[in-house]
Amino acid sequence: MKSILIKFFLMTSLIAQQVDTVIVYSLNQSLWLSHDSLVVEAFKLGYKSVGSNYTGIIKHGAFTRAEARSEGAKLFIKSYTGFLGDTLSAYQNYQDGLLSIMPAGSNAHVKVFNSNNKLPSQVSTGAGSTSNSTGYDIEFFGTDPFNNPMLSSFSNGYVAGQLAKIKDSLNCSWWEVRYRARQTASNNGIWNAENGYGEINISAAINYNGSIPSDPYVYIPPPPTYYLITLLKNYEERGQVTGNGSFLSNTSKTITAISNPGSSFVNWTENGNEVSKDSNYTFTVTNNRTLTANFKPPDIYYELVVLSAQPDLGVVYGGGSYISGSLRTISAPPYNGNSFIYWEENGSVVSTNSTFNFTLNANRTLIAYFTEYVPQPIILGKFQTKPIWRDYHKDVILFWDIVANTNKYKIYRRLKNEETWTLVDSTINSFYIDTTITRERVCYRYKIVAELNNEITESAEFNVSFLKYDKLFYKKE
């Protein structure tokens, strides 16, 4: 043996190798001088109880188990601290080849069994029940070479030396060392709460020829979990998908959808619900999944032709080339005073609205039909007078027939012998003529103009002559 690291726990590798370094855990110099240096001597005495002396490296100090492993130690001896609180750390480091040894006597009568009635990964030691009960549920008991042999103060060092001797003699795993020692100790392979398996017999352990079971302290992780990723397509001919298969749980996975020429990718769905619009979808594998890549077909365009059956009566808008399924609007506003009748397609009327909305799903040709506005002459009706008494006159109201295709009349006036017209009113079909415009005999020329959307559709003229203050007559020309 080249060296041993003693820290009041003995630690070693799980594979067969010699104990070349030991660390003894020592909190401070005072404890080293008063106690921990004797643990080292007890280790040496236990090692040489059969055969040669230990010639490896022994270090001491307030090492952690991780530091002990970095020092190359296979054995970690520890005292003066609670046993149960060290169990998890000892187990974790045991996986990396470090065996811990600790006296249970520091925690008198403390049970160290775990819930499965199995001794922990670290080796617990004590003096047994021969003298005083210094620690229950130990694995081995040993002598104290410096004080009363039945005390537990340095049993951990002594037992550690015995186990190291067996390991170095056989160059085997720590588990094999412990199993051989258990089967050949003074209790003949039988464990009890006070004495454990008893005192170790180094020679008997080395010569044990029974079978060695698997190490119960080696952590065997559960088998990895794999999940199946299944990829589907809504249409086989529209694209390709990659990334399906069986994958380890909690790993990142990217699936890819590639559209064929003319088609385009829409989204990934699962159970009918959209999960991503990205053709490269990345997620964490946590369960079996079936995902569908959805593609849409190539875009189809249709021709929409709109015509006017009477181009001089109205215009049409909305024709062109448009994508299939698009909502289209066509319109056919008529020119001045004309009227829209209907849209025709293939000889059938499809709409009587000049503005027509529909979804384009095929090539279509639609023709707009109009009716022409034919102006009608303004027919002047009989003048009717309604007296409105004033000082020396009365007004009269002139009525005329309403002309179709008009929404406004304008009344103009000029003296008969003048050329310039003056707008005097805008009305519907009646007009007040004020007889007070003159006290002389005079003749005025009136003009009635019919308009539709500010365009003149018809007009008519007539004369009104004032004879005296309260008399007038009209003459239609």
Image: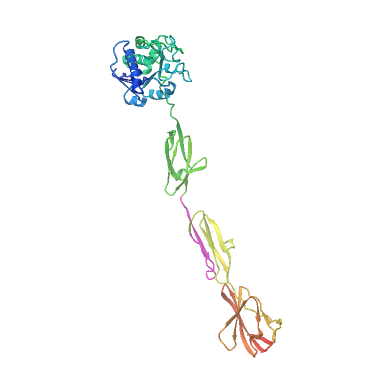
Look at the image and give the residue range highlighted in magenta: 298-320
Q: Quadrant of the C terminus?
A: bottom right
Q: Quadrant of the N terminus?
A: top left
Q: Quadrant of residue 238?
A: top left
- Residue 6 showing in the rendered view: no
Measured as percent of width and height from the top left, residue 466 is found at 66, 88
Colour theme:
rainbow
Residue drawn at (36%, 26%), measured in percent from left and top? 66
Measured as percent of width and height from the top left, residue 134 is found at 44, 14
Q: Main secondary structure of the magenta part?
A: loop
The correct choice, above or below, for 300 with respect to 21 in the image is below
Q: In this rendered view, identify the residue nearer to me: 407 or 178.
A: 178
Q: In this rendered view, identify the residue nearer to me: 151 or 305.
A: 151
Residue 307 drawn in magenta? yes
Measured as percent of width and height from the top left, residue 58 is found at 30, 20
Measured as percent of width and height from the top left, residue 408 is found at 61, 74
The correct choice, above or below, for 13 with respect to 199 in the image is below
Q: In this rendered view, identify the residue nearer to me: 314 or 139.
A: 139
The correct choice, above or below, for 50 with respect to 446 in the image is above
- Residue 452 showing in the rendered view: yes
Indicate left or right for 123 with 346 as reference.
left
Q: In this rendered view, identify the residue nearer to me: 261 or 75.
A: 75
Number of marks in the rendered image: 0
Q: Quadrant of residue 105?
A: top left
Residue drawn at (56%, 66%), measured in percent from left and top? 369
Residue 40 drawn in magenta? no
Q: Quadrant of residue 341?
A: bottom right
